[in-house]
Amino acid sequence: MSDQEFDHEMAESLQNAEAAEVVCVILPIINQCLTYDSRRALDDPPRITVSAPLGSGERRLRHVNKARPHMDRARELAVLPWSGSINAFSNSKIWGMLQDRMLSSGYPNAERQCNDALDELHQWERRSMVSMIRGQGPFHTVWSRTN
């Protein structure tokens, strides 16, 4: 795929995500998903959360609807992959779009929710890096320490 094709597909994906009720950013490097749920009620603002991947978009949508049963059911989901670092993600158009959507909701703690979600992603990235260095979880060391 050429850079031009990639840019076109990314622009199209962002456009779909800007209109979707629910946006899920899959972060396979840290085995987490960032989910933005734009639905709102008078006392229930939009949400941005971090959670483990659920395997499919349908399962993610069921999970989002189950977490907020008093809301109208979300019917559309945009899924975006991110394979880079969390620092790069925090400077990406994807994060900028999600942050803009949260902040434009007008709820007082929207900025704090964004910051908390980004902090949590950074923590997951640190844990993943430590596991990689130690050869824990899905990672294996090339050389073992002998005592």
Image: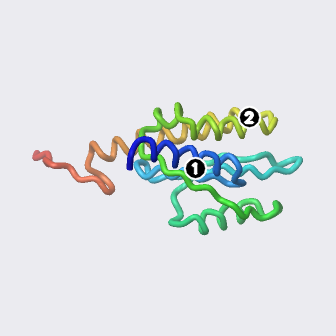
- Find disc 1 in the rendering and name its residue: 13
Q: In this view, does 74 lie to the left or right of 7?
A: right
Residue at point 60%, 45% (across, down): 14
The residue closer to the viewer here, 3 or 78, is: 3
Q: Which mark is residue 56?
A: none
Tell us which disc is closer to us: 2 or 1: 1
Residue at point 55%, 50% (across, down): 25
**Earlier sequence position, callout 2 versus callout 1:** 1
Which structural element holds mark 2? Answer: helix
Mark 1 crowdedness (10 Å alpha carbons): few <14, some 14-19, many ≥20: some
Q: In this view, does 83 lie to the left or right of 13?
A: left
Query: Is residue 45 shown above or below 92?
Result: below
- Quadrant including the C terminus: top left
Which structural element holds mark 1? Answer: helix
- Find disc 2 in the rendering and name its residue: 103
Q: At label 2, which amino acid type do we have?
A: Leu
Query: Is residue 11 shown above or below 58?
Result: above
Residue 70: give x, y in percent of width and height. Answer: 83, 62
| Residue positioned most to the left | 146
Q: At label 1, which amino acid type do we have?
A: Ser
The residue closer to the viewer here, 60 or 21, is: 21
Mark 2 crowdedness (10 Å alpha carbons): few <14, some 14-19, many ≥20: some
Query: How many discs appear?
Result: 2
Residue 108: give x, y in percent of width and height. Answer: 80, 33
Residue at point 71%, 47% (across, down): 47
Distance from the alpha carbon under mark 2 to that under mark 1: 21 Å
Residue at point 57%, 44% (across, down): 11
Residue 35: give x, y in percent of width and height. Answer: 62, 51
Residue 12: give x, y in percent of width and height. Answer: 58, 48
Name the colouring of the figure: rainbow
